[in-house]
Image: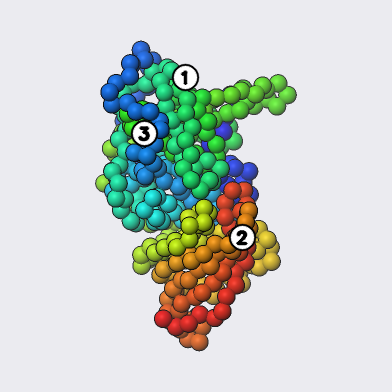
């Protein structure tokens, strides 16, 4: 069957995630195959989806990942499994130079602890701790016809989305031809998934995670001449495959991130602090895009920072001329003050603080306060910087 990773919502990549490589860590034991069992009757612990949603929504996070070589920034979903830990899909964060996590508490940076392509799963460590409880993974065997709900951020939406369905197939292996990846022991659901859902949790009515969104298909074969459209074929990695990974990876420390130029990040003085003071519906998503940009500058990954600029900006400027002026810059804090405009082109008023070597600072400043306006454009569902305007900075 012609299957595709649900993937991250990407710009310039047609929605396709990057190719996966050999996992940096493998589970200590193979995942347990799922077998059909009689459907259980409703228990007192089960809730309606309407009642369940507010109890788990704070544990579902929105991921934004920077690209390299001026390529797309991309989106995905994930869920909290520990005070600093997020589980997501391996293909969302593979080779990611900068990963940011947006939760109900705000924005923080994350690094990959480990990932496994055979179960399309990865574990991230965040700089900031989560206040809420981790969501539990279900140990209950799946049954055909069992109700479930997919939570996440499809198509790079700003607000959490939910789709519902049932378990419609068990214990299958799926191959994603475009990426030459086979994921073992997935189950099938008719609940809708779209780019951006990847890595997001699938819940049962008890509030336990029964799986992680991997991919899906709209066709029954790869042959364009004979293939037929299909519906409701979305692939979920079961909790029984995730639990051994989580047990094996918990307690490990993430390795230093690899930058776009192949260097390894070894020095970062802390995560950029972001505050949002606007109630505009897109304010949080705009702040996350600027967070990716600033954090990439902080780590010295100027190619990743460059990926947040719009295609029009990249055509009229060059990375070679832009990057040198930021070589010692570090963004300390960012306040998003206001958002104006409509549709897919918005102006964002900000104030942010940077520190830098005197030779790169305005009038020799080593600490600067900037009042800048960013014109942000929505490209493929993700906000990118189209232009920036403002007066010279003042000294701190």
Residue 217 in picture, x, y percent from top left = 58, 28
* Circles 1 and 3: CB atoms closer than 8 Å: no
- Identified at 44% across, 73% down, the residue is 353
Question: Nearer the viewer's eye, disc 2 or disc 1?
Answer: 2
- Label 2 and label 1: CA atoms lie apart by 46 Å
Vertical position of residue 19 compared to residue 96: above or below: above
- Identified at 59% across, 24% down, the residue is 231
What kind of element bears circle 2?
strand
Residue 48 image-quadrant placement: top left
Q: Which mark is residue 169?
A: 1
Considering every residue shown, the one lying at the far top of the view is: 38
- Identified at 47% across, 86% down, the residue is 364
What kind of element bears circle 1?
strand
Q: Which residue is mark 2?
A: 341
What kind of element bears circle 3?
helix
Mark 2 surroundings: few (<14), some (14-19) or many (≥20) residues within 10 A:
few
Q: Which mark is residue 52?
A: 3
Vertical position of residue 71 compared to residue 226: above or below: below
Lower sequence index among marks 2 and 1 = 1
Q: In the depicted view, which residue is nearer to us: 83 or 31?
A: 83
Query: In which quadrant is the N terminus drawn?
Result: top right
Residue 298 in picture, x, y percent from top left = 44, 66
Residue 396 image-quadrant placement: bottom left
Regarding residue 295, the answer to whether it shows in the image is no
Mark 3 surroundings: few (<14), some (14-19) or many (≥20) residues within 10 A:
some
Considering every residue shown, the one lying at the far bottom of the view is: 363
């Amino acid at each position: 069957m012609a299957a595709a990773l649900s993937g991250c919502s990407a710009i310039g990549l047609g929605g396709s995630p990057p190719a996966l490589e050999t996992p940096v860590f493998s589970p200590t034991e193979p995942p347990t195959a799922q077998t059909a069992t009689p459907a259980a009757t409703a228990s007192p612990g089960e809730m309606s989806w309407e009642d369940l949603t507010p109890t788990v929504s704070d544990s579902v996070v929105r991921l934004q990942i920077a690209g390299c070589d001026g390529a797309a920034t991309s989106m995905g979903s994930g869920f909290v499994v520990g005070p600093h830990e997020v589980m997501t899909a391996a293909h969302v964060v593979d080779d990611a130079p900068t990963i940011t996590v947006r939760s109900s508490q705000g924005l923080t940076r994350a690094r990959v602890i480990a990932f496994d392509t055979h179960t399309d799963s990865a574990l991230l460590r965040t700089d900031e701790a989560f206040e809420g409880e981790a969501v539990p993974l279900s140990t209950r065997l799946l049954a055909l016809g069992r109700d479930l709900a997919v939570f996440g951020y499809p198509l790079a939406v700003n607000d959490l989305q939910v789709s519902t369905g049932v378990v419609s197939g068990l214990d299958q292996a799926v191959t994603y031809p475009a990426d030459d990846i086979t994921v073992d022991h997935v189950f099938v659901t008719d609940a809708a998934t779209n780019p951006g859902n990847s890595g997001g949790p699938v819940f049962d009515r008890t509030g336990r995670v029964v799986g992680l969104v991997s991919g899906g298909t709209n066709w029954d074969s790869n042959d364009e001449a004979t293939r037929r459209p299909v519906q409701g074929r979305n692939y979920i990695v079961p909790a029984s495959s995730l639990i051994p990974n989580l047990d094996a990876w918990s307690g490990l420390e993430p390795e230093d991130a690899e930058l776009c130029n192949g260097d390894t990040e070894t020095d970062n003085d802390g995560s950029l602090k972001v505050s949002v003071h606007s109630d505009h519906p897109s304010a949080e998503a705009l702040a996350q895009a600027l967070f990716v940009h600033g954090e990439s500058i902080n780590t010295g990954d100027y190619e990743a920072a460059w990926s947040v600029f719009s295609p029009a900006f990249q055509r009229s400027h060059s990375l070679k001329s832009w990057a040198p002026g930021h070589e010692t810059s570090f963004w300390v804090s960012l306040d998003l003050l206001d958002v104006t405009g409509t549709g897919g082109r918005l102006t964002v008023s900000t104030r942010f603080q940077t520190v830098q070597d005197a030779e790169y600072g305005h009038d020799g400043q080593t600490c600067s306060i900037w009042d800048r306006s960013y014109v942000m454009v929505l490209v493929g569902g993700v906000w990118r910087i189209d232009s920036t305007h403002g007066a010279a900075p003042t000294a701190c």
